[in-house]
Amino acid sequence: VLRLIKIYGLSGWDVAFYQENLTDGYGEIATDARNRCACFYFPLIIDDKVMNRFNPLRTARHEVFHLLLAPLSDLVEQRYIVHDQIYTAEEDIVNKLVAVT
């Protein structure tokens, strides 16, 4: 993740990493764009069925792309748009970026 943050020019962010029991997906990120803080969450345990599909680099790239979009998402959320609409649009862009790289 730190290498990808550097590659994509995302310097100036305070980042923290946690391993937790995630209920959905392979990774998550929580950001505070105004204070430039990000918390990355990765699974503590991966069951055998999921392990066959788990790609750590792809997961890291996916979460870093969310970090890339965090300032934009923060601005959009201030414009009184429903959060679900923002999340859906952001997720679509991130998935496209992951597929290309």
Image (tube, rainbow, N blue to C red):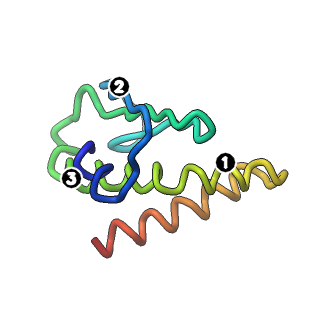
Residue at far right of view:
80
Category of crowding for the residue at label 2, using alpha-carbon neighbours closer than 10 angstroms: few (below 14), some (14–19), many (at least 20) = few
Marks 2 and 1 sit apart, C-alpha to C-alpha, by 26 Å
Would residue 17 appear left or right of 29 to someone viewing this image?
left
Mark 2 or mark 1: whose residue is earlier in sequence: 2
* Quadrant of the frame with the C terminus: bottom left
Residue 53: where, in percent of width, then height? Answer: 20, 53
Tag 3 secondary structure = helix
Is residue 7 found left or right of 75 in the rendered image? left
The quarter of the picture where the N terminus appears is top left
Answer with left or right where residue 54 lies relative to residue 13.
left
How far, Cα to Cα, is label 1 from label 3?
26 Å
- The amino acid beneath tag 2 is Asn
Mark 1 Cα-neighbour bin, 10 Å: few <14, some 14–19, many ≥20: some
Residues 23 and 37: in front is: 37
58 in relation to 12, above or below = below
Return the mark for residue 99.
none
Residue receiving disc 3: 57
Horizontal and vertical percent for residue 68? 47, 55
Q: Are marks 1 and 3 in contact (CB under 8 Å)?
A: no
Instruction: Determine which residue is flagged by label 2.
Output: 21
Residue 74 shows which numbered tag? 1
Residue in the picture at 30% in, 25% down:
19
The label nearer to you, 1 versus 3, is 1
Q: Inspect the image, locate mark 3, and give the three-letter code of the amino acid beneath it.
A: Leu
Name the residue: 50% across, 33% down.
37
Along the horizontal axis of the image, is 57 left or right of 93? left
Q: Label 1 amino acid?
A: Asp
- Gap in angstroms between the C-alphas marked 3 and 2: 19 Å
SS at badge 2: loop
- Nearer the observer: mark 3 or 2; the answer is 3
Q: Foreground residue, 50 or 65? A: 65
